[in-house]
Image (tube, coloured by chain):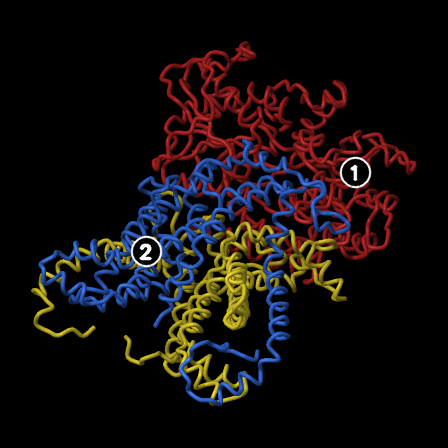
């Protein structure tokens, strides 16, 4: 953004006025539908809110309830487990698929399309399909596994298996991550690749020391987006586990608890307190990632921002 | 496609065409002046259900009086999703004048979402307290206020297969049906046939559904919720005994794993198992006894077509600590939300619905009329399939059962407690927690939530 | 995983050594290609299995879906399930399809308009407070939607907009942080000279935006539109909370409502799922390159 000064700008006041006009709608949303609701949620967490009528101050009651609430602990634990298992697995598989796609030249578009398609399936539909696929007995997944001599668990009904089944299902729609990685790979300059080939004859070595560092911005992007969205897994959990996270709360996700607290138990104040905690949790995790990002994310050109 | 939701009228109303059905039983207050339109919402169900409601609304309109026009909106979504929508509508102040509710009227009622109906019950003779069976009315009440009216009820009873009974040399007469859980368990064993891990035929499988648990608790002399003292009693001695009885039963007869039973067929109700895709053991003539509600009469001959046809109904047997049989319900109740524009008209409509309209309703969809002024006519489908006598007989039986319903669905935290009970039941039957512990957890969580709501 | 970069024609010759290695590897390539395609195809098969199962289940009768032995192909193929889907009073599919088109269309128009003007201000104008507002914009990406949802819901409910599409559509006309960010990245790539020349000619900022920047960013706008369509088509939580009447539901919610009410009808549910996903799949097949290009440009330099 360096153009010779002097001839490029009219008065900066004009430009500022124009700019504020351009961002006005967004700023309205930022204030009215983001900042104020955020403050309101935090405030509502200290209140009780009846179905009709005005909210009343409740002090720390909602947070005291949270400390004593087994569903809070259970769902936080479930959501954390889900995120910790799902996000790295998704990144690894997406990266693997991108690497494979990158070196496949024939039919690459065909494969890309297939890997991308699951993303286009609405989560409700996908969850229903997986319920069918994972039917015990003669369900297709079990039949396939049994031909390989494997003994599949009762995917959706065994309390020890159900959460992992949700993780497994989350590995299906990987299209966006894969394409992000792929575009990262394709953006690696040719000279770098040639130099890399010169440098090392071992492909794994090249992958770990050259390719991956070059796509760390994409890894960061997918990691942050992945974590934020995995904490918010809702549709799949609701369709598969219902509001009580069946079987035996093993699929009870944090978002489902917020939903049922607000719209099933009609306890908006407590739901707001739960949301506040979710916000803080996500904030802490992303800040942690960003604070470490400087040490492992390699930006091309260095000073872009 | 208009962004502003237009009032949705499912059908144009055939004004005046409604037969003046039972004009003699015309509730007097309907003739009062100062009318207005009413809006009715129902949680869905079939198209037939909508038509029935539209017809009843039209009949009321045709009578003149407080209801000058009617609008029926049906099919929002089932059960809990509907309640959530109604909750949103009440918070938004865009409410219907009458809503059918397949859920507890007390939970939203104590939060001030429904108009207490006690005054209208004094005003309209059809709605008077003495016209309702005590247990049913208690199911809509909390701390002296009535938040909904049990105009019809899905009444639970024991459904059994007389043919299977006869084959085993057991009397198939209704009055000879087992009177105690012990007896039921004893005859149940007669039917149990395994083929490998598949249950070919079976007797009765211990119940596992949270909403019906209050029935079983009452049959064992216990209770889930004590409304008078605003106290949950989930971990009472009787309830512990009940679950011990069932788990022992499961271990003895079903190899300690009800998953095996569920994968063989649905042995727990008269329907297919939606999640597992297994057929209805009862309709296939493989389950000798299941626990289900009166609505099954309407669905029985529909998909999947039954191979076994001649079912009969019997009263619930009594548990080891119980003394008398009781019955139970799935709610199918009417409420007037706060913010209704024509509550008077709504009450007048309920008066007509409870005493006259439900006759038609029951004939087409067998939700049992509960008001004692009603002379029910048997459901058409049962008459067609099983004959007039049998249809009258089960109608009488079900109305009698409606008279001995134990109070249920009457907690201010019904949904919360049911989720807790669901969890406890799953833990108990999968043996992931000891019975006493699972019940104690559900008890303390439900009680804490109850106290929180009552404090507000 | 042998040849990561792949042999390239016309690469500038950094060294003969590289070529030598490539030559050495050449015999392996045929076998390697076959192997790698075999690998890709088996992975592709795994990814396609749910689609396949959805489609064949849609063409079975309900009692043919759960069987004691697996059936990999419906026999007979029940074509009558297709018209059945469109003629159900309890699943107003066409109406809900129309709702989805309307919902996705409105949100897309709103998002493209509002995000592009905001992105212009962030990318092409200099103003006091820009970095602060932009920083805030990025920060909002980290706020889970539910956190902002409850108070918004209460307000929309109290002003009587529950049961309408207003709470679902109106906010889109004010912008979306992610797409503003994405478009800003695009706009930054537009040659400065064009904009500066127009400024020298005395063009208003709006004219520059409308006549110079937008035409340059057509691809980007299409990409934003495509993503918005996909996300809105999938949107579940908002409609679940805000909409009341089944006739107003978009498909994603209609499907859920149908399933919870008619759980036994698996084949209808699958047929509904198939036709819910189909428009997006068709859209994607025609615009795959644009999707890819959009991701390539947006993925965070």
Q: Residue furthest right?
A: B169
Q: Is residue A164 left or right of residue C69?
A: left
* Residue B295 horizontal/vertical position (percent): 65, 32
* Visible residue check, residue C143: yes
Residue C221 image label = 2
Q: Is residue C198 left or right of residue A175?
A: left
Q: How many angstroms separate mark 1 from mark 2 (CA)?
A: 59 Å
Q: Which chain is yellow?
A: A
* Residue B145 horizontal/vertical position (percent): 48, 36
Q: Looking at the image, is A152 positioned above or below residue A130?
A: below
Please tell me whether mark 1 or mark 2 is closer to you in this view.
2
Picture quadrant of residue B45: top right
Label 2 sits on a secondary structure element that is helix
* Residue of label 1: B284
* Residue A36 horizontal/vertical position (percent): 28, 57
Q: What colour is chain B?
A: red
Q: Are marks 1 and 2 on the same chain?
A: no
CA neighbours of label 1 inside 10 A, class few (<14), some (14 to 19), many (20+): some
Q: Is B325 or B336 nearer to us in this picture?
A: B336
Q: Residue at position x 49%, y 24% from top? A: B350
Residue under mark 1: which chain is it in? B
* Residue A184 horizontal/vertical position (percent): 42, 72
Q: Is B261 or C113 nearer to us in this picture?
A: C113
Q: What colour is chain C?
A: blue
Q: Residue at position x 22%, y 69% from top? A: C131
């Amino acid at each position: 953004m360096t153009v010779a000064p002097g001839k490029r700008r009219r008065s900066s006041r004009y430009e500022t006025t124009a700019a504020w006009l351009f961002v006005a709608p967004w700023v309205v949303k930022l204030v009215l539908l983001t900042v104020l609701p955020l403050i309101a949620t935090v405030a509502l967490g200290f209140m009780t809110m009846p179905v009709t009528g005005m909210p009343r101050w409740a002090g720390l009651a909602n947070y005291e309830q949270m400390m004593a609430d087994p569903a809070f602990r259970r769902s936080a634990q479930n959501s954390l487990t889900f995120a910790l298992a799902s996000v790295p697995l998704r990144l690894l598989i997406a990266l693997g698929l991108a690497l494979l796609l990158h070196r496949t030249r024939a039919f690459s578009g065909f494969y890309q399309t297939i890997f991308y398609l699951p993303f286009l399936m609405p989560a409700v539909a996908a969850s229903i399909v997986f319920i069918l696929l994972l039917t015990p007995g003669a369900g297709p997944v079990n039949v396939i596994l049994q031909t390989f001599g494997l003994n599949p668990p009762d995917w959706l009904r065994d309390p020890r298996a159900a959460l992992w089944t949700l993780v497994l299902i989350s590995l299906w729609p990987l299209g966006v991550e894969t394409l992000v990685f792929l575009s990262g790979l394709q953006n690696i300059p040719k000279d770098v690749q040639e130099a890399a080939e010169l440098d090392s004859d071992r492909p794994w070595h090249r992958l770990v020391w050259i390719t991956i560092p070059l796509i760390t911005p994409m890894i960061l992007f997918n990691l942050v987006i992945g974590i934020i969205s995995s904490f918010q897994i809702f549709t799949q959990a609701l369709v598969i586990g219902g509001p009580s996270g069946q079987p035996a709360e093993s699929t009870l996700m944090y978002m489902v608890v917020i939903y049922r607290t607000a719209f099933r138990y009609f306890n908006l104040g407590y739901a707001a307190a739960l949301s506040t905690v979710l916000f803080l949790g996500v904030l802490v995790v992303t800040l942690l990632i960003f604070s470490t990002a400087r040490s492992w994310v390699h930006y091309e050109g260095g000073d872009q921002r | 496609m208009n962004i502003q939701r237009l009032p949705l009228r499912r059908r144009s109303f055939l004004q005046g065409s409604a037969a003046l059905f039972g004009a003699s039983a015309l509730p007097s207050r309907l003739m009062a002046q100062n009318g207005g339109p009413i809006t009715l919402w129902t949680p869905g169900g079939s198209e037939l259900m909508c038509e029935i409601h539209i017809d009843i609304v039209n009949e009321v309109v045709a009578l003149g009086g407080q209801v000058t026009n009617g609008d029926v909106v049906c099919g929002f979504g089932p059960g809990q999703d509907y309640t959530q929508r109604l909750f949103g509508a009440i918070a938004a102040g865009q409410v219907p004048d009458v809503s059918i509710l397949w859920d507890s009227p007390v939970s939203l009622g104590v939060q001030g979402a429904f108009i207490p109906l006690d005054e209208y019950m004094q005003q309209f003779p059809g709605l008077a307290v003495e016209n309702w069976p005590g247990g049913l009315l208690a199911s809509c009440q909390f701390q002296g206020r009535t938040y909904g009216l049990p105009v019809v009820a899905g009444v639970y009873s024991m459904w059994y297969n007389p043919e299977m009974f006869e084959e085993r040399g057991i009397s198939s007469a209704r009055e000879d049906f087992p009177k105690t859980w012990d007896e039921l368990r004893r005859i149940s064993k007669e039917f149990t046939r395994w083929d490998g891990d598949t249950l070919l035929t079976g007797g009765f499988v211990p119940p596992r559904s949270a909403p019906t648990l209050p029935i079983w608790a009452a049959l064992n002399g216990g209770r889930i919720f004590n409304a008078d003292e605003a106290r949950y009693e989930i971990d009472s001695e009787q309830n512990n005994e009940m679950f011990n009885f069932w788990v022992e039963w499961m271990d003895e007869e079903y190899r300690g794993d009800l998953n095996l039973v569920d994968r063989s067929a649905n042995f727990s109700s008269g329907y297919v198992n939606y999640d597992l895709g297994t057929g209805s053991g009862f309709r296939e003539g493989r389950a000798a006894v299941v626990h289900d509600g009166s609505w099954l009469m309407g669905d029985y001959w529909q998909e999947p077509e039954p191979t076994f046809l001649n079912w009969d109904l019997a009263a619930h047997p009594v548990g080891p600590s119980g003394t008398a049989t009781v019955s139970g319900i799935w709610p199918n109740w009417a409420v007037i939300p706060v913010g209704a524009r024509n509550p008077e008209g709504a009450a007048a409509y309920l008066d007509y619905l409870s005493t006259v309209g439900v006759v038609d309703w029951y004939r087409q969809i067998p939700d049992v009329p509960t008001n004692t002024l009603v002379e029910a006519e048997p459901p058409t489908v049962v008459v067609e399939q099983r004959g007039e006598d049998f249809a009258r007989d089960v109608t009488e039986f079900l109305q009698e059962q409606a008279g001995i319903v134990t109070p249920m669905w009457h907690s201010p935290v019904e949904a919360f407690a049911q989720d807790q009970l669901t969890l406890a039941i799953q833990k108990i039957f999968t043996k992931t927690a000891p019975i006493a512990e699972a019940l104690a957890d559900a008890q303390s969580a439900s009680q804490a939530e109850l106290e929180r709501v009552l404090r507000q | 995983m042998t040849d990561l970069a792949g042999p390239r024609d016309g690469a500038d010759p950094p060294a003969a050594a590289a070529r030598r290695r490539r030559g050495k590897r050449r015999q392996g390539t045929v076998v390697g290609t076959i192997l790698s395609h075999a690998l890709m195809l088996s992975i592709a098969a795994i990814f396609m299995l749910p689609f396949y199962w959805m489609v064949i289940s849609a063409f079975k009768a309900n009692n043919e879906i759960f069987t004691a032995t697996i059936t990999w192909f419906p026999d007979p193929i029940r074509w009558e399930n297709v018209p059945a889907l469109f003629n159900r009073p309890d699943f107003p599919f066409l109406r809900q399809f129309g709702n989805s088109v309307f919902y996705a269309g409105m949100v897309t128009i709103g998002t493209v308009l509002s995000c592009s003007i905001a992105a212009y201000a962030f990318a092409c104008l200099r103003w006091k407070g820009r970095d602060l507002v932009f920083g805030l914009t990025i920060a909002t990406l980290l706020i889970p939607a539910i956190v902002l949802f409850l108070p918004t819901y209460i307000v929309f409910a109290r002003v009587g907009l529950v049961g309408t599409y207003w709470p679902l559509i109106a906010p889109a006309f004010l912008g979306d942080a992610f797409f503003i960010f994405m478009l800003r990245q695009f706009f930054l790539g537009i040659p400065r000279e064009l904009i500066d020349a127009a400024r020298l000619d005395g063009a208003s900022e709006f004219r520059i935006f409308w006549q110079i920047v937008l035409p340059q960013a057509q691809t980007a706008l299409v990409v934003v539109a495509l993503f918005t369509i996909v996300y809105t088509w999938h949107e579940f939580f908002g409609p679940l909370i805000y909409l009341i009447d089944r006739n107003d539901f978009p498909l994603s919610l209609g499907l859920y409502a149908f399933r919870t009410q008619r759980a036994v009808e698996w084949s209808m549910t699958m047929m509904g799922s198939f036709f819910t996903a189909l428009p997006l799949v068709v859209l994607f097949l025609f615009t795959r390159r644009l999707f890819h290009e959009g991701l390539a440009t947006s993925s965070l330099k």
